[in-house]
Amino acid sequence: MRDGTVMVTGGAGYIGSHAVLALLDAGWKVVVIDNLVTGFDWAVDKRASLVVANIEDDAKVRAAIREHKVFAIMHFAGSVVVPESVTDPLKYYRNNTAASRALIESAVAEGVKHFIFSSTAATYGIPEVVPVREDSPKLPINPYGMSKLMTEIMLKDVAAAHPINYCALRYFNVAGADPQGRSGQSTAGATHLIKVAVEAATGKRDSVAVFGTDFATPDGTGVRDYIHVTDLAAAHVDALDLLIADPGKNHTMNAGYGRGFSVLEVLDAVDRVTNMTINRKLEGRRAGDPDALVADNAAILAALPWRPKNDDLDQIVRDALAWERKLAERGAGR
Ligand SMILES: NC(=O)c1ccc[n+]([C@@H]2O[C@H](COP(=O)([O-])OP(=O)(O)OC[C@H]3O[C@@H](n4cnc5c(N)ncnc54)[C@H](O)[C@@H]3O)[C@@H](O)[C@H]2O)c1
């Protein structure tokens, strides 16, 4: 057992529940704060404590930090649906930016030493150069990306003023599920391609929409960098060690594999893995979708001992499919 407790906000959600597993497997104690707005209490590993609360509730958050002697926070809680952020921007500035501000304030007030933040490739907007480096211009094209960029900026200023250091990880497209079948993406109405495709494979949907076939890519469909959620979770555990090793230093790093697959390549993988032909519905582009979004991951590879272990598209699809089948057995979309 490592000596200390990590608070995981959003630990009942998709990525957070995998981070909880990775932390527990690495010997850390974990307390989860989640208001279960999109997460599920059953998704939190029983070895962790769960406090059902909004991260804005400073009394509850501060009490949990004190009670569990939390020395580090991994902050996954937030609202994550990009198109919804366009129609309801204030929800995103509230639940991502303002709620993060409240959480950071609680962390500083209680003397938490390290903070790891779920940022996103959406902070780049439409990058001019791909693979995209961390120092590329940050020009988000939707309130979701902006709400996350604003949190990065807060963290930078707070770490300069208070004894806390931080690591912002800018995730690319997160997919897959725990290879041991302990967690996966359970979100109702998810919009992520691989999740949607495995839902189609298990009969939950009739077809998968392909948004745009005229992008400047080899097959005309959008190219994205898909990272296995278990690799992403492992990167957080290594990032925590990095923050502990040098408390004077902060980090902002892309979390991706540095190579992209087109929508059609992903759907081919799903067909291959399922031995089915998933029905594809070709539709127009969605506003603001870049041609290609692929990480330059030199920084994370240089800073962390972390190396991807599940960097295989078919493996990502297989794990996502296995979890989807478990959810189907559970019923009620869970
Ligand atoms: N999924 C991706 O591809 C991706 C890409 C980039 C960044 N991210 C970021 O990763 C994080 C996790 O995303 P996810 O895909 O696991 O989403 P998710 O919806 O599965 O998880 C979010 C969790 O946070 C909880 N939550 C939301 N608002 C809360 C609040 N105010 N107080 C307490 N709990 C709250 C939800 O109940 C849920 O359990 C998010 O911050 C998201 O922006 C995700």
Image: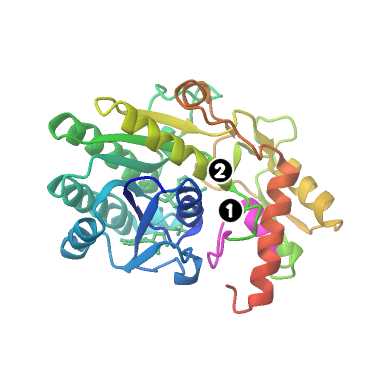
Q: Which segment did they paint magenta?
A: 183-199
Residue found 35% across the figure and 34% down from its top: 167
In the displayed structure, does residue 291 sit left or right of residue 20? right
Q: Marks 2 and 1: CB-CB under 8 Å?
A: yes
Asked if 234 appears above or below 189 in the picture, the reply is: above
| Residue placed furthest toward the right | 275
Residue 97 seen: yes
Residue 153 falls within the magenta-colored stretch: no
Residues 90 and 277: in front is 277
Distance from mark 1 CB to nearest ligand 1 atom below 8 Å: yes
From the image, tell me which residue sits under label 2: 173
- Measured in 3D between alpha carbons, the distance from the residue under mark 2 to the one under mark 1, in whole angstroms, is 8 Å
Residue 77 seen: no
Residues 334 and 295: in front is 334
Counting residues from the start of the chain, the first of labels 2 and 1 encountered is 2
Residue 196 falls within the magenta-colored stretch: yes
| Residue placed furthest toward the bottom | 332
From the image, tell me which residue sits under label 1: 192
Residue found 78% across the figure and 46% down from its top: 269
For the residue carrying disc 2, how many other residues have a C-alpha within 10 Å: few (<14), some (14-19), or many (20+)? Answer: many
Look at label 2 and name its amino acid. Asn
In the displayed structure, does residue 168 sit left or right of residue 274? left
Q: The residue tagged with tag 1: helix, strand or loop?
A: loop
Residues 130 and 313: in front is 313
Question: Residue 2 location, x and y as percent?
Answer: 39, 45
